[in-house]
Image (cartoon, grey):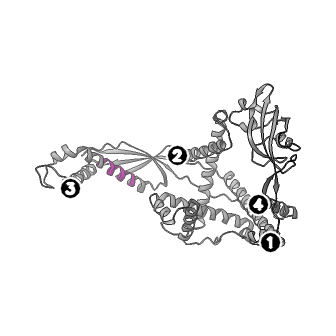
Amino acid sequence: MNATVKDINETRKQLLVQVSGEEITKEENNLLGEFARQASVKGFRKGKAPEQMLRAKFGKNIKEELTQRLSNSAYQAGLKESKLNIVNLLNVEGNEFLSGQDAEVTITVDIKPEVSVPDVSDIELEEISIEVSDEDVENSLQQLLGERATFETVDRTAVAGDYVKCSYEGKLDDQLVVELVTDRPVYGSQSSTWEEAGESKEGVPSVEAIIQGLIGMKAGDEKDVEHLYPEDFEVEALSGKTVAYHIAVEEVREKILPDMDEGFFKGLGVEDEEHLRKGIRENLEQQKKQNVQTQHRRQIEQALQERSDFPVPESIHEQEANTFLQNLVNNFHRQGMGEEELEKNKEQLHAVAQESATNRIKLRYILLQHAEDKKIGVEDSEVQSVIVNEAMRQKVKVEDLVKDLRKDPSIVQGIRDDIVIDKALHDILHGIKGDECCEDHHHHDHDGDETAVED
């Protein structure tokens, strides 16, 4: 078989593989011999049935097997002769094989692009303080106490920090807001909901005028408040509008923080308040160091993407963009966004997904190339550690997860790639920051001579 390469674009190629009539005849004869040896034909011992009867009875099977074998052989021959780094097999055409007649098989593939790792050693990493203040420690301590608080019903007006069971209904002029924003009822009306008086929670949708208005109210009280939504508010129907809300309170509960006594400290595994505060400070310092590490890695990722210019394979890009878009839609659904609002922003969501897919694929190729250039490998023990952690996360037996992974070797290869990508990124960061980057980071060999493990 002879193969030539036809360019469609930089990452999509066609392999034109010539299959001679002699090769087709030889493979068909081999197949006929196999069928003759194995097939049962009434009136004949195995291996003795005439060719005509074999063709009459098994012609379709023989043709399908012939097509499969020769198509695979054509692909392997094209792969060997072209030396292309194929990432996706897209299509096989022209695989009608007739004995004695030459055939041409056209195989369309996407290939890995030529990738060079840009130099980012000159970027100035953002200076981020890791200092932990006494206020930080106190806030964390109060949060810790709050997580262990109890709540007692009180017969008084609510103060900031109390939890209030209430109902509310909003109107914009004479129209009920819940009818305008059916997919975001939190801004329209709620019945028997619990709100923390005086304090809005970051990332939790709420109406500031309501939670502020609860202060000074007690069970049985009702009140009217107004809330002005900003011009850039996420719900278009309410942006720049003033909504009137009627609030009715059913119950007020006071948050009772636990006493910091011997039992409290014992439950946390510390000796006393001093040791508790020390532990909180150390945890906060560790978190800040990890945040700095994360921010610096993101800076490097962005620089690598901005300084690279190569095309990404179309089929890989399509898969990545679809996955990203689906995750984006799922996140918006979880946040309460309805189909109507998603439809309005469809073009923008698609644009975000397309750009994000390009950046992700480029970054992955760059870091894999860096790992190859620096001979950064992955040990079996590292893969096993990831599998064990995943089994614990899924709450399944390690051996059961391993059995599932063996069914699809590409998943294990993906784990290996993820590990080596993380190592490559860390190696680049180490080149910029030196040993400062390595504090509290898992083991990485900066000489780049870890032993690569074969699959």
Q: CA distance from mark 2 to mark 1?
A: 62 Å
Against 429, residue 195 (above or below) is above
Q: Residues within 10 Å of mark 3 (few under 14, many from 20)?
A: few
Segment tinted magenta in the rendering:
66-76
Which residue position holds label 4?
Answer: 148
Q: Nearer the viewer, residue 347 or 272?
A: 272
Q: Position of residue 80 (x, y in %)?
A: 41, 57
Question: N-terminal of the two: label 4 or label 3?
Answer: 3
Residue 128 visible in the displayed image: no
Question: N-terminal of the two: label 3 or label 2?
Answer: 3
Q: CA distance from mark 1 to mark 3?
A: 81 Å
Which residue position holds label 1?
Answer: 262
Against 451, residue 304 (above or below) is above
Q: Is residue 67 magenta?
A: yes
> Disc 4 or disc 2, which is closer to the eye?
4
Q: Amino acid at mark 1?
A: Glu
Q: Nearer the viewer, residue 264 or 219?
A: 219
Which residue position holds label 3?
Answer: 38
Question: N-terminal of the two: label 2 or label 1?
Answer: 1
Q: Is residue 328 magenta?
A: no
> Disc 1 or disc 3, which is closer to the eye?
1
Q: Residues within 10 Å of mark 2 (few under 14, many from 20)?
A: some
Q: Amino acid at mark 3?
A: Gln
Which residue position holds label 2?
Answer: 315
The residue lying at 35 percent from left, 48 percent from top is 18
Q: CA distance from mark 4 to mark 2?
A: 51 Å
The number of numbered badges drawn on the structure is 4
